[in-house]
Image (cartoon, rainbow, N blue to C red):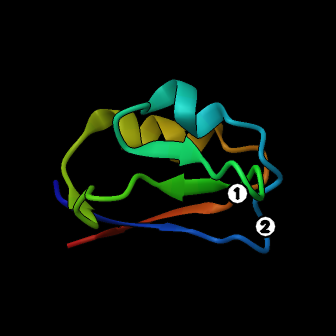
Amino acid sequence: MTYRIEVDADLCSGYGNCVVAAPDVFDLDPGTNLAIVKPGRPLLADDAALREAEADCPARAIRLTRR
């Protein structure tokens, strides 16, 4: 399954669970300490870790849209 990855900065609280679940996809912005999709990472990805990151986000800030 391929997904479009979105992080809602208004909901993100910087817990970092997404970085633990999918460190090749997510990072914490050093200026805001909020989750971001790593630069250069395609917005479409197929990865079980993405589903884990979405499920583990306590703020529900990660949205995966099936493509």
Q: Is residue 54 left or right of residue 40?
A: right
Residue positioned 49% across, 28% down in the render: 21
Query: Going 65% across and 33% down the picture, which residue do you hit?
Result: 17
- 5 or 24: which is nearer to us? 24
Amino acid type at circle 2 is Leu
**Dot 1 amino acid type:** Arg
Quadrant for the C terminus, please: bottom left
Q: Which residue is mark 1?
A: 60
Left or right of 15 in this view: 51: left
Name the spot of residue 55 as percent of width and height, x first: 57, 42
Residue 31 against residue 20 in the figure, above or below: below
Task: Farthest residue to the front: give it.
Answer: 31
Label 2 sits on a secondary structure element that is loop
Which of the marked residues, 2 or 1, is nearer the chain's N terminus? 2
Which one is in front, 48 or 28? 28
Q: Nearer the viewer, mark 2 or mark 1?
A: 2
CA distance separating discs 2 and 1: 7 Å
Q: Looking at the image, do the residues carrying marks 2 and 1 touch, with CB atoms under 8 Å apart?
A: yes
Label of residue 33 in the image = none
| Res 36 → quadrant | bottom right
Which residue is depicted at the point 18% across and 48% down?
46
- Please name whichever residue, 42 or 64, is drawn nearer the observer in this view of the structure: 42
Task: Pinpoint residue 19: horizontal percent, then vertical percent.
Answer: 54, 34
Q: Is residue 8 above or below residue 14?
A: below
To which quarter of the image does residue 37 belong? bottom left
Estimate how packed mark 1 is, as few (under 14), some (14 to 19) or many (20 or more) residues with alpha carbons within 10 Å: some
Residue 48 percent coordinates (x, y): 30, 35
Image-quadrant location for residue 64: bottom left
Residue position for label 2: 11
Quarter the N terminus occupies: bottom left
The residue tagged with tag 1: helix, strand or loop?
loop
Residue 57 is left or right of residue 10, and the answer is left
